[in-house]
Amino acid sequence: MEITTTFRELQWGAEIQFPNSRGLSKSPHFVGGRYPCRSVAFVPRIIIDDFSGTAENFSILDPFMGSGTTAIEAVRRANSVHGVEVDPYARLIATVAARKDSQDEIQELESLVLEIGSKVDSQKPDKALLPELKNINYWFGETNFSELLKLKSAIFDATNEGMARDFLLAAFGDIIRACSKAERQSLKPYISKKYVKQPKPVLAEFLRIAPKYVQAVAQSSDHKCDGIIWEGQDATEFGTSKSIDLAITSPPYINAMDYTRCIKLESAWIGTADDAAIRAVRNAQLGESVRRHQVTDDEFISSIAIKHFGDLEAIDEVKFKTALAFFDDMKGNLRSVFNSLKAGGIYYIIIGNSKIRGIDVPTHLAIADIATELGYKWEKYFQYRIKDHRTSIPRGDRGGKIEFEHVLGLVKP
Ligand SMILES: C[S@@+](CC[C@H](N)C(=O)[O-])C[C@H]1O[C@@H](n2cnc3c(N)ncnc32)[C@H](O)[C@@H]1O
């Protein structure tokens, strides 16, 4: 791919182009493909390719790991890969996608898929495995609901806690939306009264998706390291078990979309979330309006808010405070990463700008100001046009589509 050769010479603010990502569908990036707001894999790829030209042994961190796009790219090159992520479903997907599986383990997964497929019909459903989400039945037809429970029971019967079960649960999570009555197009679960959806039959869908998962993780034998070392769940305050050479992340957008809700059916079925857990994760999500209650009275953050989007306060105080809380949280994140980085280490942040109630919020400039205050040097900056809006956050009439993502390279001197 040509872009890697020009990465180093990129001019300040240059607009970079990416090839389309069709070729990635047979790679580990296939795992958890419906996770909302996934990053474009080429961004961490070019950054890591460039970095590995200057260093042989290095560690990589993504503090907003999501479904693991950075990690999937990082495990091929880095000696260790570290992650922080608040959402348990995301952690499951990322763990599975970035893990190094031996050929024997891949064969075992292949056989397990077939074994489970052959047992589901006669499987006794285990009621203890029912999802604990209010009104969960609303989203599924009766047959699919009981088939899903049988399939999950078969997965639990065939495996112990560990890598094989995680793998099967990740594939199981991926069929939930297709087997539900919820629209596939909408990120948030939603049942259209006008267009009645035909949910996919459970076993056939599992036997279609799971072998693709096997194929996706089968290429992991060339990984340089084993998988993700989880360093915590809160990106605003954490430390790492090892000092870090390179951090790459894509934080959430401000007040953009409640994506904990987008994946609530999957989370409930794989068992990582009940109603209370979903609420807790949501309250911990950066950029969510609930966090405005936690905003500190940091004078510097207030001055950044006034400087970059002061007009918003008079128009919508709640949204102003939501944005303030976001930057307050990002300050915690920038500080935690700073403390984890080696001297000379670099933190790449990929972020789209926001428009809130018609006011432009130049997120990348505000983050750069906070980073500078904390001691970083802003050394690199480029942007790219978002091509695939299906995976990004639709902002409806609340601000139009995010057209560009900005990439900031911040160095710890
Ligand atoms: C833009 S997404 C990252 C997407 C990721 N790069 C991928 O390709 O899947 C932002 C992630 O930050 C996570 N997140 C939000 N608030 C967090 C917090 N306080 N601590 C850790 N992770 C958080 C969200 O759950 C989400 O997965």
Image (cartoon, rainbow, N blue to C red):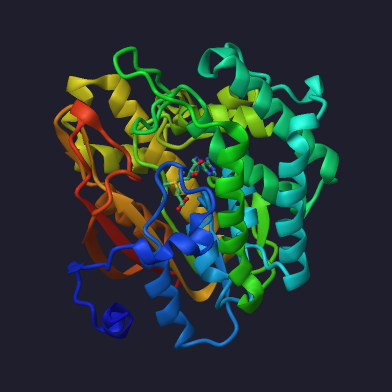
**If the image is split into quadrants, where does the C terminus sit?**
bottom left
Say if residue 77 shows up in the picture.
yes
List x then y, in percent, for residue 284: 54, 33
Identify whether 152 is placed above or below 24: above
Side of 40 where 207 appears, left or right: right
List x then y, in percent, for residue 6: 26, 83
| Along the viewing direction, whichever of 225 and 213 lies nearer the viewer | 213
| Along the viewing direction, whichever of 376 and 104 lies nearer the viewer | 104
| Along the viewing direction, whichever of 63 and 337 lies nearer the viewer | 63
Quadrant housing residue 316? top left
Identify whether 46 is placed above or below 171: below
Side of 298 where 154 appears, left or right: right
Identify whether 411 is placed above or below 6: above
Residue drawn 35% across and 30% down?
A: 186
List x then y, in percent, for residue 194: 29, 14
List x then y, in percent, for residue 386: 24, 53
Side of 60 where 249 appears, left or right: left
**If the image is split into quadrants, where does the N terminus sit?**
bottom left
Residue drawn 42% across and 26% down?
A: 292
Say if residue 85 shows up in the picture.
no
Quadrant housing residue 56? bottom right
Quadrant housing residue 287? top left
Residue drawn 40% across and 21% down?
A: 190
